[in-house]
Image: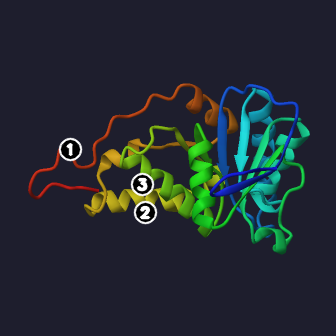
Amino acid sequence: MTYTLLKEIIYRSNNERINEMKICIFGASSEQIDKIYISTAESLGRAAVLRGDSVIFGAGKYGVMGAVARGAAEAKGELIGIAPRFFINDRVLFDGCTELVFTETMRERKAEMEDRADAFIICAGGIGTFEEFFEVLTLRQLSRHTKPIIIYNVAGYYDALLAMMEKSVSEGFMSEECLKLFTVAHTEQEVFEQIDNYQAYTYNKYGYLKDGESNG
């Protein structure tokens, strides 16, 4: 076992390979959701691996998270699960990861996922997924990274959230420029096209401000 300050790598496949990208996929842990979210997530995980990418996820075996993991594992790809140590007691961990990393806290878990990832895909989810999306978006807005952020809007799940963000812009709480820091995909093909064709949008939250201007 290899130990570091924040994490412990529990196991890792001996057959390591070089991947095109490490894609972090966020999504629900709930099982009480429509099957369309499960089937599209499983297909997404499989497709990511088949095109040569690694998958980073929250290490859970249920819901969208578990579906992504099953797809990636069935395609025999690199699957990196990252979870807080207390998940061991909750018995929620997916057991097919090629690498499983434990952190001490949820905050450290997010930081580890963010640091390792080359891109983020936001699948349908609840509170945890919302938090993960807004954290990577906030960091992008503050120029802490320039990685692609793609909302995978299956069955229009995120329509209301996107409308809320548009309202935030219209009310002056956010700059319209913030809406250019992520993209929205409605199909799996669009997800990967947006990753492959990504060009970072240059945005300085504070660099252009004058008295009375928006700083969203």
**In the rendered image, which residue does mark 3 sit on?**
138
Q: In the figure, residue 111 lies in which quadrant?
A: bottom right
* Lower sequence index among marks 2 and 3: 3
Query: Tag 2: residue type?
Result: Met
Q: Report the front residue among 117 and 199.
A: 117
Q: Report the front residue among 164 and 25.
A: 25
Location of residue 102 in the rendering, given as x and y in whole percent from the top left corner: 73, 59
Dot 2: within a 10 Å radius of its alpha carbon, few (fewer than 14), some, or many (20 or more) residues? few
Location of residue 41 in the rendering, given as x and y in whole percent from the top left corner: 76, 48
Dot 3: within a 10 Å radius of its alpha carbon, few (fewer than 14), some, or many (20 or more) residues? some
Horizontal arrangement in the rendering, residue 215 relative to residue 107 (left or right): left
Work out whether 106 lies above or below 154: below
Q: CA distance from mark 2 to mark 3?
A: 16 Å
Labels 1 & 3 near each other (Cβ < 8 A): no
Labels 2 & 1 near each other (Cβ < 8 A): no
Of badges 2 and 1, nearer the viewer stands 1
Residue at x 20%, y 56% (from the top left corner): 214
Query: Tag 1: residue type?
Result: Gly
Quarter occupied by the C terminus: bottom left
**In the rendered image, which residue does mark 1 sit on?**
207
* Lower sequence index among marks 2 and 1: 2
Residue 13, disc? none
Q: In the figure, residue 200 lies in which quadrant?
A: top left
Dot 1: within a 10 Å radius of its alpha carbon, few (fewer than 14), some, or many (20 or more) residues? few
Q: Report the front residue among 104 and 161.
A: 104
**In the rendered image, which residue does mark 2 sit on?**
164
Q: CA distance from mark 1 to mark 3?
A: 16 Å
Local secondary structure at mark 2: helix
